[in-house]
């Protein structure tokens, strides 16, 4: 038994919504890449994960909405929804996210300079001072260890204490 034109229209519109949802998922990965620069291998892993998410979402959507029948207009609808989101709301989301990330980095850097950097500087100075003390004390200990190897003078023997 076939599907009605109204049913196909709903499938298409819902697939557009699914494509927009996948666009949101893609933007999450993009924001993560902006916030934390990744090596190439991590980007590859993220892209593979996104592909698996898209394939799974499409599979389960087709399974639930159309009894697992593959219809090309569903895939086209997903692509249209993704592109609509990517070119409109997605561009705005990325622009706002970049601003938020820039502001968060500025706040964190300022907090670092105010609270953490002086402590780190103080610890570095204390470490240098401690190294100097350890170096000088090691020199003194080496000299003392060298002196320990020198035998003590033998006491002079008094003649009447000599026993045969």
Image (spheres, rainbow, N blue to C red):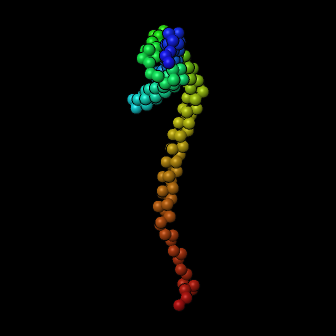
| Of 27 and 39, the residue lying toward us | 27
| Of 83 and 12, the residue lying toward us | 12
> Residue 84 appears at what percent x and percent y?
47, 10
Residue 143 in sight from this viewpoint: yes
> Residue 39 appears at what percent x and percent y?
41, 30
Snapshot quadrant of residue 44: top left
**Is 45 situated left or right of 10 in this image?**
left
In the image, residue 90 above or below residue 159: above
Residue 20 in sight from this viewpoint: no
Q: How many marks?
A: 0
> Residue 55 appears at what percent x and percent y?
46, 26
> In the current view of this chain or complex, which residue is farthest to the bottom?
164
> In the current view of this chain or complex, which residue is farthest to the right?
115
Q: Residue at x 44, y 14 (%)?
A: 73
| Of 56 and 94, the residue lying toward us | 56
> In the current view of this chain or complex, which residue is farthest to the left?
40
In the image, residue 149 above or below residue 101: below
Q: Residue at x 50, y 22 (%)?
A: 62
> Residue 113 appears at what percent x and percent y?
55, 24
| Of 135 and 122, the residue lying toward us | 122
In the image, residue 14 above or below residue 55: above
Q: Residue at x 54, y 43 (%)?
A: 130
């Amino acid at each position: 038994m076939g599907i009605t034109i109204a049913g196909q229209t709903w499938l298409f519109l819902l697939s557009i919504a699914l494509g927009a949802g996948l666009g949101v998922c893609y933007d999450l990965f993009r924001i993560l890449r902006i916030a934390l620069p990744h090596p190439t291998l991590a980007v590859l892993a993220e892209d593979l994960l996104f592909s698996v998410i898209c394939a799974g979402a499409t599979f389960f959507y087709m399974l639930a909405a159309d009894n697992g029948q593959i219809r090309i207009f569903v895939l086209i609808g997903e692509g249209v929804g993704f592109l609509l989101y990517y070119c409109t709301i997605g561009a705005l989301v990325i622009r706002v996210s970049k601003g938020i990330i820039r502001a968060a980095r500025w706040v964190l850097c300022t907090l670092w300079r105010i609270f953490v950097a002086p402590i780190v500087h103080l610890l570095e100075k204390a470490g240098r001072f401690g190294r100097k003390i350890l170096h000088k004390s090691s020199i003194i200990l080496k000299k003392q260890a060298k002196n320990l190897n020198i035998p003590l003078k033998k006491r002079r023997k008094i003649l009447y204490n000599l026993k045969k």
